[in-house]
């Protein structure tokens, strides 16, 4: 657990709490990156956007924690655990909510010192990323930090390609595209490049990659003052906005 009795956040056996592993083979516990990127302190309020069942704060005692997710099943299971405020965001998603609506993030009352989204906007298009960041900035926030996928990181691209081949037996060749600003991969069968606004199309797996220089410039041009940041223990890039 994270023992807060002495005013600090002490981590114990987090790998046992989060037994799955990520792209780099590390335990699938995101709290170390979260803590580093936000300089998180006990008592900070958190909006975990796309937070599923609330795994981020698993083991933190009585956090000021709100989860918003497009999966009604995840929200139901999160509520059953009873830690935090869980909100169903009924927006369409290519992977996770085929019955959802075309809506934007609703305004949430209260202060959020940290707005976090990990492995969320790798499963949307640019337009949803842009509009969601704008919605976050309309809230009372301290910092915003969201992860994205870098098409120029060939080890990450290779990981996703091998994952598709393992699941489907084969995959269309999408890993050798050049001058890619954005690439969205549908299952193992097709990809779209250079489009900010991807049409709705239900699929099992939907993943979007970006050229990071283009992404930051495009978001800046759209009025979003994002900067790139990295945590010390992962190669996954993050977009960061401070208030």
Image (tube, grey):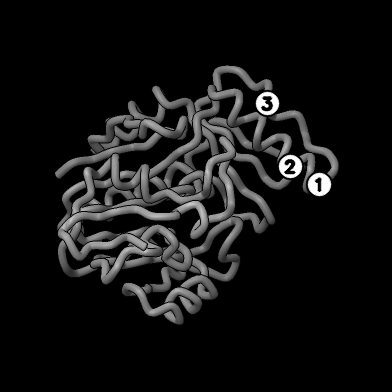
Give whichever of 173, 156 is nearer the camera: 156
Do the CB atoms of the residues marked 2 and 1 lie less than 8 Å apart?
Answer: yes
Please tell me whether mark 3 sits on a helix, a strand or a loop: loop
Classify 10 Å Cα crowding around label 2: few (below 14), some (14-19), many (20 and above): some
Residue 3 position within the rendered picture, expressed as x and y whole percent measured from the top left: 28, 62
| Res 130 label | none
Quadrant position of the N terminus in the picture = bottom left
Do the CB atoms of the residues marked 1 and 3 lie less than 8 Å apart?
Answer: no
Q: Going by the image, does 217 lie left or right of 97?
A: left
Give whichever of 162, 13 is nearer the camera: 13
Quadrant position of the C terminus in the picture = top left
Q: Rounded to the nearest whole Å, what is the CA distance between mark 2 and mark 1? A: 6 Å
Q: Rounded to the nearest whole Å, what is the CA distance between mark 1 and mark 3? A: 16 Å
Q: Where is mark 3, residue-wise?
A: 175
Q: Residue at x 47, y 64 (%)?
A: 52
Q: Going by the image, does 79 lie left or right of 66?
A: right
Determine which quarter of the picture holds residue 165.
top right
Determine which quarter of the picture holds residue 61.
bottom left
Residue 161 position within the rendered picture, expressed as x and y whole percent measured from the top left: 70, 35
Please tell me whether mark 1 sits on a helix, a strand or a loop: helix
| Res 164 label | 2
Residue 197 position within the rendered picture, expressed as x and y whole percent measured from the top left: 49, 44
Q: Rounded to the nearest whole Å, what is the CA distance between mark 2 and mark 3? A: 12 Å
């Amino acid at each position: 657990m994270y023992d807060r009795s002495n005013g600090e956040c002490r981590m114990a056996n987090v790998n046992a709490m989060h037994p799955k592993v990520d792209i780099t083979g590390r335990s699938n516990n995101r709290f170390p990156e979260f803590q580093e990127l936000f300089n998180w302190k006990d008592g900070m309020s958190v909006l975990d956007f796309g937070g599923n069942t609330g795994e981020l704060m698993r083991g933190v005692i009585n956090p000021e924690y709100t989860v918003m997710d497009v999966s009604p099943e995840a929200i139901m299971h999160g509520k059953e655990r009873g830690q935090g405020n869980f909100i169903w965001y009924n927006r369409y998603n290519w992977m996770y909510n085929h019955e959802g609506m075309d809506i934007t993030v609703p305004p949430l009352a209260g202060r959020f010192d940290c707005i976090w989204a990990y492995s969320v906007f790798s499963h949307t298009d640019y337009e949803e990323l842009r509009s969601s960041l704008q919605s976050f900035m309309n809230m009372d926030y301290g910092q915003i930090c969201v992860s994205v996928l870098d098409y120029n990181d060939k080890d990450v691209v290779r990981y996703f390609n091998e994952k598709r081949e393992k699941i489907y037996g084969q995959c269309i060749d999408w890993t050798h595209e050049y001058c890619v600003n954005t690439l969205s991969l549908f299952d193992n069968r097709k990809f779209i490049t250079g489009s900010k606004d991807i049409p709705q199309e239900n699929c099992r797996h939907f993943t979007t990659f970006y050229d990071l220089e283009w992404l930051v410039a495009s978001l800046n041009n759209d009025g979003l003052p994002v900067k790139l940041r990295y945590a010390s223990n992962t190669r996954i890039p993050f977009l960061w906005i401070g208030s």
